[in-house]
Image (tube, rainbow, N blue to C red):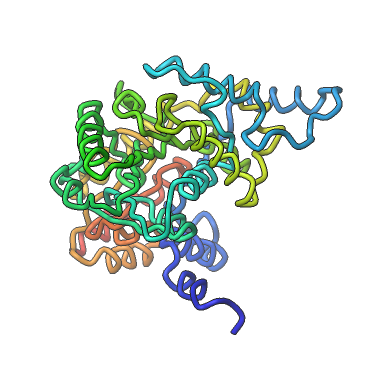
Amino acid sequence: MSVSNKIRGAIEKSSWIRKMFEEGARRKAQYGADKVFDFSLGNPNLEPPSKVKAVFEDLVRDPREGQHAYMSNAGLVETRQAVADYLNTFNEPRFSADDIVMTVGAGGALNVVLKTILNPEEEVVIPKPYFVEYNFYLDNHQGVPRLVETQPDFSFNFDAMEAAINEKTRAVLINSPNNPTGKVYRAEELKELGRLMTHYSGKFGQPIYLISDEPYRKIVYDGISVPSVFDAYPETFVVTSFSKDLSLPGERIGYAAVHPEISDKAMVVAGMVLCNRVLGYVNAPAMMQRAIARLLKESVDISIYQRKRDRLCEALTSFGYDIMKPEGAFYLFPKTPIADDVAFVAALQDENILTVPGTGFGGPGHFRIAYCVSDQVIEGALPGFERVNKKY
């Protein structure tokens, strides 16, 4: 046998997102790229802001020695301090460089946090729909996902969350703005979640951590802002990256931040720094750390994504689709007109439209459209979206 039974099984049930992306590549080769409308992957189509390239050019020309050497496994002190200063502009707690660990993207940050806090078979409560790679990240560290339903508008269902919390609960993992729904959790929701977790942390005699995955924090619409989870609960980690707001997914740079008042902070941070090394990341890329320190307030033009969202929502609603208008990120999560979302997505494939069934996110009866694509892809797909919905 060439690979382990575990990995063989993981391949067989691997992400629907990747399956649809690969189907898109096959169809593009068969029909031509301009005839295939691929909404499968959240890969930003916008180029990074012009300042990003200017900073890169400046760093490449930097004549100082040692610019590409190893550093502390937590990351460059000056970058961590810059991140802390940035966090201090919109959070009540006061951060320092010691509260930040630079990582290889948000995925790296989440693995670092999970490896640091999890004992074997401990559980992490996750509201669904959710990004299903979380399952693999938890499995990496012998954790167990405990999935809970949300309300019809994708807000927290506190009864379901409370029912899921038990002696094995180590953390609650949320994602706001959410992939795949675009939901932004409100400040009062977060405070209520903090009260719930404070109660059960006291009951079970150890912290239940809140982990907030926030790579879409800057991609919000209609004047909405993303409330601070740090203001709601002290036993909190935030993991994030610059993949989406700076259109740098291939550069794999992000960070994990811990609440300055988290319990046993010195040990928690020491654990994160160790895990950053032993997971194989060693430290985040040096050049990207130096770049990010100068780009923390930058982002792509969010109005472009909002225009794409509005165009799709208007058109699909006119075709009869049932859509909860997303408040952030760059995904739509409409209901499918039939119960079998996999069959509906297959019908869209017949029109060379590639989307992802909601089943792949723990949200059956829906499908995800990643609208971080060109306007030509959106406009070219609209007639097919209309034809398929009319069939049902």
Q: Where is residue 327 drawn, in percent x and y?
A: 29, 33
Q: Which residue is farthest front?
A: 205
Left or right: 67 as drawn, with respect to 361 = right
What residue sits 40% from the left and 17% below the top? Answer: 90
Instruction: Decide which of 146, 275 is in the foreground and name it.
Output: 275
Which image quadrant is residue 138 in? bottom left
- Residue 282 appears in the picture as rendered: yes
Q: Where is residue 68 drawn, in percent x and y?
A: 79, 34
Q: Where is residue 347 drawn, in percent x and y?
A: 31, 66
Left or right: 259 as drawn, with respect to 389 = right
What residue sits 61% from the left and 27% below the top? Answer: 292
Instruction: Decide which of 112, 309 is in the foreground and name it.
Output: 112
Locate the C terminus and report the quarter of the image it occupies. Answer: bottom left
- Residue 50 appears in the picture as rendered: no
Q: Where is residue 264 drawn, in percent x and y?
A: 44, 33
What residue sits 27% from the left and 61% below the top? Answer: 388
Numbered marks: total: 0
Which image quadrant is residue 61 in? top right
